[in-house]
Image (cartoon, rainbow, N blue to C red):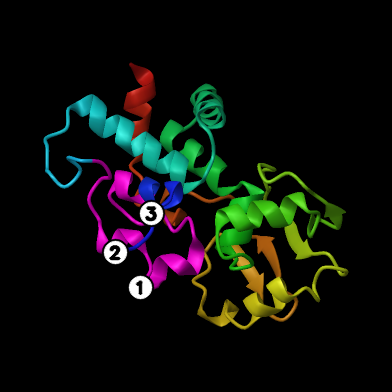
Amino acid sequence: MIKQDNVCRKCRREGKKLFLKGEKCLSAKCAFTRRSYAPGQHGARPKKLTDYAVQLREKQKARRTYDINETQFKNYYKKAAKTKGDTGELLLSSLERRLDNVIYRLGLSDSRKQARQLVSHGHLKVNDKKVNIGSYLVKEKDKIEINKKSIALSIFKDRQAKLKDINIPSWLQLDQQKMSGLVLHLPNKEEVETDIDSALIIEFYSK
């Protein structure tokens, strides 16, 4: 029997792999592979969800995918709603532009949680300046690099060998040799590699 933890339960609750544990989610030890139904006594019983429940689940899925709390997520929505343009697209773009997510998308970390730890420990810099805040929003033409003193760490050496197999989003560019990334432009809705339905999230907050 696979031992469950709170992280695995999040995936089961949302009915999909959120890859919160990185490569472990692709292994035979993945709890979701064995039990894809929701946790709890009645989790395996299918039930019809109300419109509100569907919207709530989509919001929770997005929040858990990017591994941020409710207050942070709602603030992203509020800012997107006040900005001219498509609110759903602006919301997803902001989430994608978080430095911890960019590190993950570039393949420099195994998961967003690990990326946040690397940033908070001062291993990354943006435009030659050390940034230790995972929620930092990158901008167009920003260059993301690993600090020279950190590049020799085993965690980065191990990742470098795997970079050739990483599918890099079209709005980012990766230099595998230098293990650095460049923000070519801000991501649009079509370039965000996720199955999150932002329209349901907007409906949830619009009530």
Q: Residues within 10 Å of mark 1 (few under 14, many from 20)?
A: few
Q: Is residue 112 above or below residue 67?
A: below
Drawn side of residue 129 relative to residue 168, left or right: right
Q: Is residue 22 above or below residue 57?
A: below
Residue 141 visible here = no
Disc on the earlier residue, 2 or 3: 3
Secondary structure of the residue carrying tag 1 is loop
- At 53% from the left and 68% from the top, the residue drawn is 168
Q: Residue 4 has which mark?
A: 3
Q: Which residues are magenta?
A: 11-40
Which quadrant of the view contains residue 207? Answer: top left
Q: Are marks 1 and 2 in contact (CB under 8 Å)?
A: yes
Q: Nearer the viewer, residue 6 or 190?
A: 6
Q: Whole-Å distance between the Cαs marked 2 and 3?
A: 12 Å
Q: Residue 28 has which mark?
A: 1
Residue 164 visible here = yes
Q: Is residue 84 above or below residue 96?
A: above
Q: Residue 2 has which mark?
A: none
Residue 30 located within the stretch drawn in magenta: yes
Q: Residues within 10 Å of mark 3 (few under 14, many from 20)?
A: few
x, y percentage for residue 129?
86, 53
Instruction: Quadrant for the N terminus, please.
Output: bottom left
Disc on the earlier residue, 1 or 2: 1
Secondary structure of the residue carrying tag 3 is loop
Disc on the earlier residue, 3 or 1: 3
Q: Mark 2 sits on what residue?
A: 33
Q: Residue furthest top?
A: 207
Drawn side of residue 83 relative to residue 195, left or right: right
Q: Are marks 3 and 1 in contact (CB under 8 Å)?
A: no
Q: Which amino acid, mark 1?
A: Ala
x, y percentage for residue 13?
31, 44
